[in-house]
Amino acid sequence: MNEKPQLLDKFSEWNRFVLQITELEWQTPIDEGKWTIHDIVSHMMLWDKYFYEEAIYPIANGKQVTVSHLDFDAFNREAIEYGKTLTKDELIDLTTRYRNLLVDTIQRLDDDTFSRKYAEGKFTVKTYLQDFIWHDQHHITQMEEYKRKSGIYSHHDTKGERHEVF
């Protein structure tokens, strides 16, 4: 069974969530000593950029995958600092652009390319999607919990539009 459509749909949820973030929530840490929403979005955007440039784009174009083990803490610190140079709108634009590039590029991969092992067996597109869907959900859950604790609730009407309820 081809899981790619379901994985890509779930992977696309991040963009839908990011587009719902309000100005009120944007610069507020999600908990004491934790990142702000802006920091989280910047962190996610740079991971998307990294994996697009170092893995997904090369795979789609028959080139060598250059994804490698990184110092995650250093990468995340740099992502947060980079995010501070961007406005909310700039960051949302980059976030949705890189996630859309990933989704569109992966969508076009044939099943063999999607399932093949790369980087000496350390990377598959399927596992990448599964891992980052988990990562997305981890941060979405954090932000939803922050909103719940803050008394900021949201609901979706039947047209899929989101409304804040304070």
Image (tube, rainbow, N blue to C red):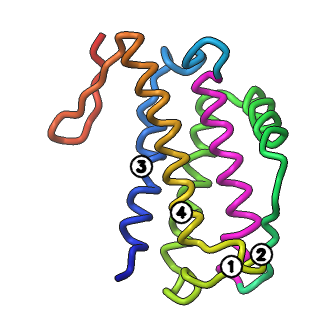
* Nearer to us: label 4 or label 3: 4
Q: Residues within 10 Å of mark 3 (few under 14, many from 20)?
A: some
What amino acid is at disc 3? Answer: Glu
Q: Is residue 20 magenta?
A: no
What amino acid is at disc 1? Answer: Ile
Can you give x and y, in whole percent of width and height, for residue 68 in the image?
A: 82, 63
What amino acid is at disc 2? Answer: Val
Precedes in sequence: disc 4 or disc 3: 3
Q: Is residue 53 magenta?
A: yes
What amino acid is at disc 4? Answer: Leu
- Cα–Cα gap, marks 1 and 2: 6 Å
Contact flag, marks 1 and 2 (Cβ < 8 Å)? yes
Placement of 35 over or under 63, stated as above or below: above
Is residue 42 rendered to the left or right of residue 97?
A: right
Precedes in sequence: disc 1 or disc 2: 1
Can you give x and y, in whole percent of width and height, for residue 165 in the image?
A: 27, 15
Furthest residue toward front: 121
Quadrant in which residue 44 is drawn: top right
The residue positioned 29% from the left and 31% from the top of the image is 162
* Secondary structure type for disc 4: helix
Precedes in sequence: disc 1 or disc 4: 1
Magenta-tinted stretch? 35-61
Furthest residue toward left: 158
Task: Identify the mark at residue 65; answer none if there is no mark.
Answer: 2
Is residue 87 rendered to the left or right of residue 24?
A: right
Q: Which residue is labeled 3 in the image?
A: 13
Task: Identify the mark at residue 129; answer none if there is no mark.
Answer: 4
Placement of 46 over or under 53, stated as above or below: above
Precedes in sequence: disc 1 or disc 3: 3
Q: Residues within 10 Å of mark 2 (few under 14, many from 20)?
A: some
